[in-house]
Image (cartoon, helix red, strand yellow):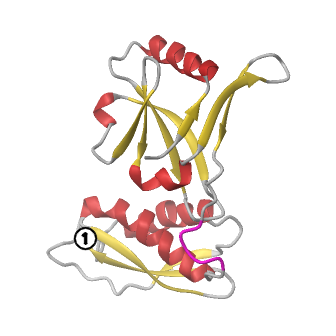
Amino acid sequence: MSKISVTEKAQEYFLRIIEKQKMDGLAIRLTATNTGTPGVQCGILYCPKEYITPNDEHFQMKGFEIVIDSAVIPYLDESVIDLGKDDKGEDLLTFHAPNLNKQDLPEDATLQDRIARFIETTVSPSLASHGGAVTLDSVTEDGVVKVRFEGGCLGCSMVGVTLKDGIEGQLNQAFPGLIKEVIDVTEHHVTDETFG
């Protein structure tokens, strides 16, 4: 079982803001995005009960619950959330996650290996709802990422938008300053699986 520590003051703060929302069963979700990359980030969100999934791990607090997707638990394990004051005396919530930069690849993994892992675990699953997928073809020395679309993405009229607004944006956030551009090297043709 993972360990998440929330101080008494922080629990009281969460309970106050949850009660103001007047939503039955509202939880607090801890998130980690771009895990295993230089652009990794953690966050704290409201989580209505209908967005709690079977993949979530639950942490019971005083009067509310914290949920975390089990896929990011290793990165948020041993986290500490506290409530202090900023320079102006305002409440300041702090989220200390010592394992956030945990790498699931060896220290000497290449940029191509890291990008391939990110595409496999983060980017491609987001296309699965359309029956599509994307894989890494190669990464050039000057940071050009070449990808291939599969399934419902083959021949899709939205593939250009997905490439530039979706995939390129995600990679730039995850690997800041390391990506020059993302290009599609797929030979597109419409199939029975094509979406859009």
In the image, is residue 182 above or below residue 123? below
Q: In this view, does 185 lie to the left or right of 38?
A: left
Q: Main secondary structure of the magenta part?
A: loop
Q: Quadrant of residue 49?
A: top left
**Along the viewing direction, whichever of 78 and 140 lies nearer the viewer:** 78
What segment carries the magenta color? 103-107
Q: Residue furthest right?
A: 87
Q: Is residue 161 magenta?
A: no
- Label 1 residue SS: loop
In the image, is residue 149 above or below residue 161? below
What is the tally of numbered marks visible in this picture? Answer: 1
Q: In which quarter of the image is residue 110?
A: bottom right
**Residue 116 in view here:** yes
Give the x, y percent position of residue 137: 46, 86
Picture quarter with the C terminus: bottom left
In the image, is residue 36 above or below residue 62? below
Q: Does the magenta stretch include residue 105?
A: yes
Q: Residue furthest front?
A: 1
Identify which residue is drawn at 68% across, 73% down: 178
**Mark 1 — residue?**
152
Give the x, y percent position of residue 80: 62, 37
**Along the viewing direction, whichever of 24 and 104 lies nearer the viewer:** 104
Identify which residue is drawn at 38% across, 23% down: 26
Badge 1 crowding class, 10 Å Cα cut-off, few under 14, some 14 to 19, many 20 or more, is many
Identify which residue is drawn at 60% across, 74% down: 181
What kind of residue is marked 1? Gly
**Along the viewing direction, whichever of 64 and 185 lies nearer the viewer:** 64
